[in-house]
Amino acid sequence: MGKLLERPSKAKTESIPELCDGDRMDSDEFLRRYVATKTVHRAELINSVVRVYSYRDPSTGEVQPMSPTGSIWHGLPQMDISFLLRYYSWKTKGPIASAPATVIFPSGENTVDPDALLYLPEELGGRCKVNDSDLLVGAPELLVEVSHSTAKKDSTLKKALYWQEGVLEYVNYRRKTKELDWFFRTPSIFEQIQPEDGVLKSKTFPGLWIDVKAFLDADLDGMIRSLDAGLASPEHAKFVEKLRRARAKRK
């Protein structure tokens, strides 16, 4: 994801150090340098260390990825799971889906751009709010990473920091091995959710169901059928009513 934040004036940026891969800092300093550094297109802060993923060639203005993003390997599954999360949020009236979005975690050590996410706003009992720069602050309930060249990092480093920061569910799709893993946070680890009759079911968002085979086959019809079944389930109806009562209570 490229930067969309308002860039400070030229005079101000000249006094701000550039963001460089491997630098150590907190989230506030990371965002200050990220916005000001014209050559960095996409970066994250992981365990207080800057990770630069793509940069902008100052002579041509073209974005040069550190590792190219594939259309079928990465773009398609990211689009599919983003669509499912958006469809779920639309039908549920409360959770908010995004793909992607910058997340600033409470520790100040991690600022990341997950491939997709689903969260509840604070007014409905969630742990996230949107700041004045349109960035998410807090720990979203559900984060998604689509992995190809980043498979090792996403399944180890990011998985560990997401648990540490309080994320409730983590979904990781690994293209090379065609594995879709869904984890639920326990007090000590991320525990893997096992499919029920081939369907993965969220514990945090009732009715969010994904047919594993349909997803791996990029079968959108099959994915929608499974999600529609979840949306028609009694547990989803109870969740919708819970959210309705929460909204009514705030009025």
Image (tube, rainbow, N blue to C red):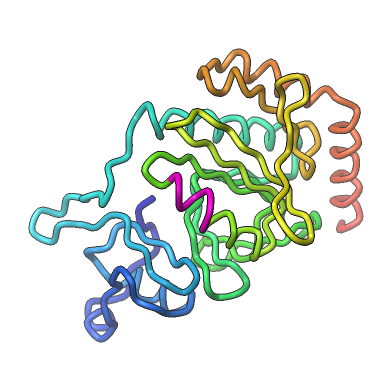
Q: Is 49 situated above or below 217?
A: below
Q: Is 214 situated above or below 124?
A: above
Query: Is 197 positioned to the left or the right of 245 in the image?
Result: left
Q: Residue furthest bottom?
A: 15
Q: Residue at x 90, y 44 (%)?
A: 242
Residue 56 coordinates in the image, percent (x, y): 21, 57
Does the segment drawn in magenta span residue 244? no
How would you classify the magenta stretch by its main secondary structure? Answer: helix
68 vs 58, nearest the viewer: 68
Query: Is 15 positioned to the left or the right of 103 in the image?
Result: left
Q: Residue at x 84, y 32 (%)?
A: 236
Residue 206 coordinates in the image, percent (x, y): 81, 36
How many numbered marks are there?
Answer: 0
43 vs 121, nearest the viewer: 43
Q: Is 214 situated above or below 136?
A: above
Q: Quadrant of residue 227?
A: top right
Image: magenta residue range: 151-157
Q: Which residue is drawn at 73% across and 47% down?
A: 191
Residue 249 coordinates in the image, percent (x, y): 91, 55
Query: Is 250 positioned to the left or the right of 85 in the image?
Result: right
Q: Which residue lies furthest to the left in this view?
A: 59
Residue 128 coordinates in the image, percent (x, y): 67, 61
Quadrant where the C terminus lies?
A: bottom right
